[in-house]
Image (cartoon, rainbow, N blue to C red):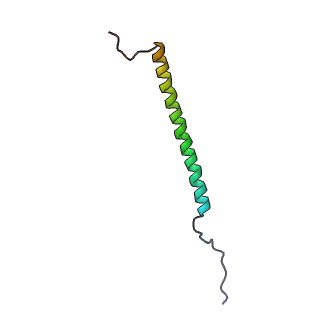
Amino acid sequence: MAAHKIAHATLKGPSVVKEICIGIALGVFAGSLWKMHHWNEQRKTRAFYDMLEKGEISVVVEE
């Protein structure tokens, strides 16, 4: 009896280059989100101190 050849998917190990590219892409994405968050916090702080300097707001409680 002749053995039938069946095409099976061969399992390959992880592609190192692909893993590095995915890691770099995820790192750049996460870094850019963090940087945008940091810039927004800086903008809020700068706006607070500008308003404080102009006298529009005060940190002293009025009686």
Looking at the picture, tell me which residue is in the foreground, 47 or 4: 47
Q: Residue at x 58, y 57 (%)?
A: 20
How far from the left and from the top, in percent, is residue 25? Answer: 59, 50
Q: Residue at x 55, y 49 (%)?
A: 27
Tell how many labels. 0
| Residue furthest left as drawn | 63
How far from the left and from the top, in percent, is residue 11? Answer: 59, 70
Q: Is 61 drawn above or below residue 34 in the view shown?
A: above
Q: Residue at x 35, y 11 (%)?
A: 62
Q: Quadrant of the N terminus?
A: bottom right
How far from the left and from the top, in percent, is residue 4? Answer: 66, 82
Q: Is 55 drawn above or below residue 38 in the view shown?
A: above
| Residue furthest bottom as drawn | 1
| Residue furthest front as drawn | 53
Q: Quadrant of the C terminus?
A: top left
Q: Is residue 11 left or right of residue 52?
A: right
Q: Is 47 drawn above or below residue 56 in the view shown?
A: below
How far from the left and from the top, in percent, is residue 33? Answer: 54, 40
Q: Is residue 24 left or right of residue 44?
A: right
